[in-house]
Image (cartoon, rainbow, N blue to C red):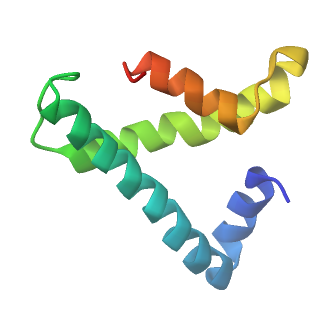
Amino acid sequence: MSIEVVAIQSMVEPEIRKTMLVYFERIRSALEQKIILLMSKGKIKKNKNTEQLSVALFGLVIPGFTVQSVFMDEKAIDSAKYVQALNLLIGNK
């Protein structure tokens, strides 16, 4: 089942939404911890609202992966390569 189908089902099925909220919050929280770590290392500018930054990053990463996998055809990258590319973009080795 694709993320698009789950997203649509989550809008009309409360139990699916409840389940997805748990998983998406784990992802958002992990992104926030990564942001905090990068700030502590001086890799990105410090900001007091890391939650907002993590929500914005979540909004870019999750739909971005889906869109590239659907529309980039042979240029599309798998999840491991997507993570590697993101790490390069945000300054991790």
**Quadrant of the image for the C terminus?**
top left
- Say whether residue 66 is left or right of residue 87: right
Dividing the picture into quadrants, the one containing residue 17 is bottom right
Q: Residue at x 57, y 21 (%)?
A: 85
Instruction: Work out whether 11 lies above or below 74.
Output: below
Point out the residue furthest to the bottom here.
Answer: 15
Dividing the picture into quadrants, the one containing residue 37 is top left
Q: Position of residue 88 (x, y in %)?
A: 47, 18
Instruction: Work out whether 54 lies above or below 60.
Output: below
Instruction: Work out whether 19 lies above or below 48.
Output: below
Residue nearer the viewer, 2 or 88 = 88
Q: Residue at x 62, y 39 (%)?
A: 63
Point out the residue furthest to the right here.
Answer: 74
- Say whether residue 67 is left or right of residue 30: right
- Say whether residue 88 is left or right of residue 79: left
Q: Residue at x 82, y 23 (%)?
A: 71
Q: Position of residue 86 (x, y in %)?
A: 51, 26
Q: Position of residue 20 (x, y in %)?
A: 59, 69
**Quadrant of the image for the N terminus?**
bottom right
Instruction: Work out whether 14 lies above or below 39.
Output: below
Residue nearer the viewer, 31 or 91 = 91
Query: How many numbered badges does the structure rendering display?
Result: 0
Residue nearer the viewer, 25 or 79 = 79
Q: Residue at x 70, y 38 (%)?
A: 79
